[in-house]
């Protein structure tokens, strides 16, 4: 009986082993076959001595892209394409225009503007010179009812740091070779009620409103009829006024200040530093100055502005220090 039971167990074990073997054989066929791993992209080989020195520039390499050939290489050339409009030129083209000029009476072409003060009376503390640095030869002065303003008309840049407000100006002196200097009348200074108030250097010679108007009328007439035509630089035209009081009897000074035809405008401000703005211009532009000063004086923003002539000796000293005339 025991032998029969052992034989049955052995047969059952064999049957289970056969079933297990069949299931293992059928399992791989049911599963999805594994993917083949993609080969890693190898970096391009380092150039050898032969490839570096190879003179075949267009030799094919497996990692190179083939050169794209144009569809019709004989149709177009470099001259067929317009120049690039998106890339600006690094250098501007050479200027072919002549010297700047304008007949606008509101634009006085000046050679330069300089600022002095009590500490620096011979050397300017600031300057703008026509045609030097970033300033073009279109440096202009505009005289309006609001004051004096300097602009670079060619570049269209307003030089706001050189603005002179009308209410800050106390005296404007003008040198005109044809008109000479009309010395302002000597008037006694008013009695100083405040002992701590410093008196100004022009307190005794600021002309009255009537005297300023008379001088501007003469200046406008002389500059319009004579200076505008270049009478001083050409040596033509008599001077108005007394020659003894208008210019020093010195041949060098006469040649320097008068025959050169320069006009000088000096504006003195009401401040503790004693700022003075000096404008140098050619005689052909002086008639615009006379018109502008008349307009300025009639404005509502001026406060007791006086206008008179600039002495010839001071004019000569200013032009010499600024390098416009030789010593």
Image: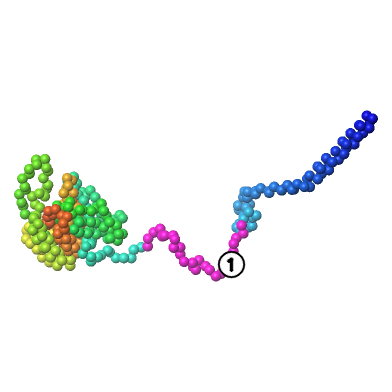
Count of numbered badges drawn on the protein: 1
The relative height of residue 203 versus residue 108 in the rendered view (above or below) is above
Range of the magenta residues? 65-93
Label 1 CA crowd tier, 10 Å (few <14, some 14–19, many 20+):
few
Q: Nearer the viewer, residue 205 or 93?
A: 205
Which quarter of the figure has residue 227? bottom left
The relative height of residue 269 versus residue 179 in the rendered view (above or below) is above
Q: Residue at x 27, y 63 (%)?
A: 100
Q: Residue at x 16, y 58 (%)?
A: 299
Q: Nearer the viewer, residue 246 or 28?
A: 28
- Mark 1 lies on residue: 71
Residue 131 shows in the view = no
Q: Residue at x 78, y 45 (%)?
A: 28
Q: Residue at x 62, y 59 (%)?
A: 66
The picture places residue 144, in percent across and down from the top left corner, at 20, 59
Q: Nearer the viewer, residue 86 or 227?
A: 86
Quarter that holds the N terminus: top right
Quarter that holds the C terminus: bottom left
Q: Residue furthest top?
A: 2
The picture places residue 230, in percent across and down from the top left corner, at 18, 66
SS class, disc 1: loop
Q: Is residue 157 left or right of residue 222?
A: right
29 within the magenta span: no
Q: Is residue 313 left or right of residue 114?
A: left
Residue 119 shows in the view = yes
The picture places residue 134, in percent across and down from the top left corner, at 31, 55
Which quarter of the figure has residue 113? bottom left
């Amino acid at each position: 009986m025991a032998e029969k039971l052992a034989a049955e167990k052995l047969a059952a074990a064999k049957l289970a082993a056969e079933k297990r073997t069949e299931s293992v054989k059928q399992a791989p066929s049911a599963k999805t076959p594994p993917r083949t791993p993609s080969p890693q992209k190898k970096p391009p080989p380092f150039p050898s001595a032969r490839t570096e020195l190879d003179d075949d520039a267009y030799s094919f390499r497996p990692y190179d892209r083939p050169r794209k050939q144009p569809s019709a290489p004989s149709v177009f050339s470099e001259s067929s394409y317009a120049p690039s409009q998106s890339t600006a030129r690094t250098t501007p083209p050479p200027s072919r225009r002549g010297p700047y000029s304008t007949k606008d009476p509101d634009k006085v072409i000046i050679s330069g503007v300089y600022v002095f003060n009590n500490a620096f009376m011979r050397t300017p503390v600031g300057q703008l010179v026509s045609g030097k640095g970033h300033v073009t030869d279109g440096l202009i002065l505009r005289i309006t009812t609001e004051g004096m303003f300097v602009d670079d008309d060619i570049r269209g840049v307003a030089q706001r740091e050189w603005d002179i407000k009308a209410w800050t100006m106390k005296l404007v002196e003008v040198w005109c070779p044809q008109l000479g200097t009309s010395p302002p009348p000597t008037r006694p200074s008013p009695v100083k009620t405040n002992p701590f108030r410093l008196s100004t250097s022009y307190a005794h010679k600021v002309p009255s409103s009537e005297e300023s108007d008379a001088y501007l009328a003469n200046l406008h007439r002389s500059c319009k009829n004579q200076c505008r035509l270049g009478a001083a630089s050409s040596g033509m035209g008599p001077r108005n006024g007394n020659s003894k009081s208008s210019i020093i009897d010195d041949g060098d000074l006469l040649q320097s200040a008068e025959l050169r035809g320069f006009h000088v405008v000096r504006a003195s401000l009401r401040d503790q530093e004693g700022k003075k703005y000096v404008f140098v211009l050619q005689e052909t532009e002086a008639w615009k100055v006379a018109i502008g000063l008349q307009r300025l004086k009639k404005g509502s923003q001026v406060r007791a502005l006086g206008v008179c002539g600039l002495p010839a000796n001071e004019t000569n000293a200013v032009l010499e220090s600024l390098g416009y005339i030789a010593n």
